[in-house]
Image (spheres, rainbow, N blue to C red):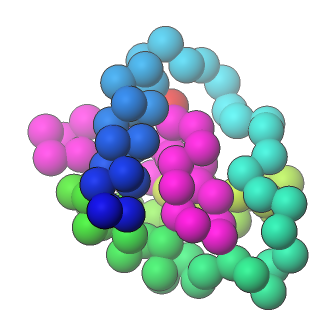
């Protein structure tokens, strides 16, 4: 069920991605880093829903994972993830 929710959230955000511009300056989490999953674990969760992950890193602000991904059709996206859940917070 969690995979299904993640897939639905990702697809709804990605559907609106062309309308989004600029970089994300919001907050993905306020949880301490001890509660974060690893970048590798977040990458695996994103791959489970069908994205090829090119790169994943912590944002400069230090409260999101930023993932550069490609969907099954080859469209490129930049995803900002909550590092405690790997849920998509913002996409462009």
Q: Position of residue 22 (x, y in %)?
A: 66, 24
The magenta segment is 68-91
- In this view of the protein, can residue 76 be seen by the observer? no
- In this view of the protein, can residue 9 be seen by the observer? yes
Q: Is residue 5 left or right of residue 67?
A: left
Q: Position of residue 31 (x, y in %)?
A: 83, 68
Q: Position of residue 43 (x, y in %)?
A: 43, 71
Q: Is residue 10 magenta?
A: no
As drawn, the residue found furthest toward the front would be 1
In depth, the one of 68 and 39 nearer the eye is 39
In depth, the one of 70 and 45 nearer the eye is 45
Is 29 located above or below residue 16 in the figure?
below
Q: Is residue 92 left or right of residue 33?
A: left
Q: Is residue 88 magenta?
A: yes
How many numbered callouts?
0
Q: Residue 64 sits in which quadrant?
A: bottom right
């Amino acid at each position: 069920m969690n995979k299904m929710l993640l897939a639905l959230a990702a697809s709804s955000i990605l559907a609106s991605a062309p309308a989004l511009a600029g970089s994300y300056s919001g907050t993905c989490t306020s949880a301490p880093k001890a509660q974060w999953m690893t970048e590798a674990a977040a990458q695996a969760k994103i791959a489970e829903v069908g994205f090829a992950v090119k790169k994943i890193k912590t944002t400069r602000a230090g409260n999101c994972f930023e993932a550069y991904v490609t969907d099954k059709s080859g469209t490129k996206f930049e995803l900002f993830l909550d590092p405690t859940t790997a849920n998509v917070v913002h996409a462009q």
